Image: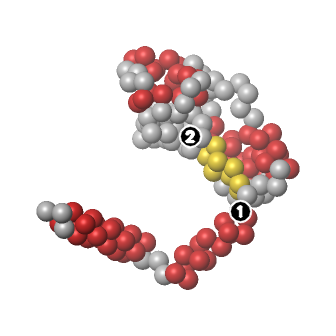
Amino acid sequence: MKIILPILLALLICQSSFAQKKIWNETEEAKAKRLEWWQNDRFGMFIHWGSYALAGRHEWVKKRERIPDEEYQKYFDNFNPDLYNPAEWAKMAKKAGMKYAVITSKHHEGFTLFDSKFTDYKATNTPYGKDALKEWVDAFKAEGLKI
């Protein structure tokens, strides 16, 4: 029995590695080319933001605190980020020397910062009423930052 577990673990790792290569079908040269910009640019920003920010605690607030949908709805109903200024964020990022930015466009609880035909749980249906992601993309591109 003690030998079976390591063998199963080894098989799982090999299968995962094989599946990844098969899915991506990516050579080492292609991978190097794909990552070249990142290795060159290095300094960037990761923004993790959404309706959960209204709770003022952490991004996993709904799951970790086991908040029911009915109670969590207040964050959606009140999502109206009055201090959201992606143009200012982009200018500060560029001034700091950043070359790229990443943003959470849809969080695990399903809330999207963009307009989507696949869900009503989106920023365009909140009091904010706009596609927050589009504003962000446009602002960062205008500053010449990769997104």
- In this picture, residue 9 sits left or right of residue 109: left
| Amino acid type of the residue that numbered disc 2 sits on in the rendered structure | Phe
Q: Label 1 vs label 2: CA separation?
A: 27 Å
Q: Residues within 10 Å of mark 2 (few under 14, many from 20)?
A: some
Residue 98 image offset from top left, x and y in percent: 77, 55
Taking depth in this image into account, of 77 and 25 the one nearest to the observer is: 25
Check contact, mark 1 vs mark 2: CB within 8 A: no
Residue 75 image offset from top left, x and y in percent: 52, 22
Colour scheme used in the picture?
secondary structure
Does residue 3 appear in this view?
A: yes
Does residue 69 appear in this view?
A: no
The residue at which mark 1 appears reads as 42
| Amino acid type of the residue that numbered disc 1 sits on in the rendered structure | Arg
- In this picture, residue 57 sits left or right of residue 42: left
Q: Residue furthest left?
A: 1
- Residue at (69, 50) in percent of width and height: 45
Residue 129 image offset from top left, x and y in percent: 60, 28
The residue at which mark 2 appears reads as 114
Question: Looking at the picture, does residue 78 appear above or below residue 50?
Answer: above
Question: Looking at the picture, does residue 46 appear above or below residue 72?
Answer: below
Numbered tag placed on residue 34 in the rendering:
none
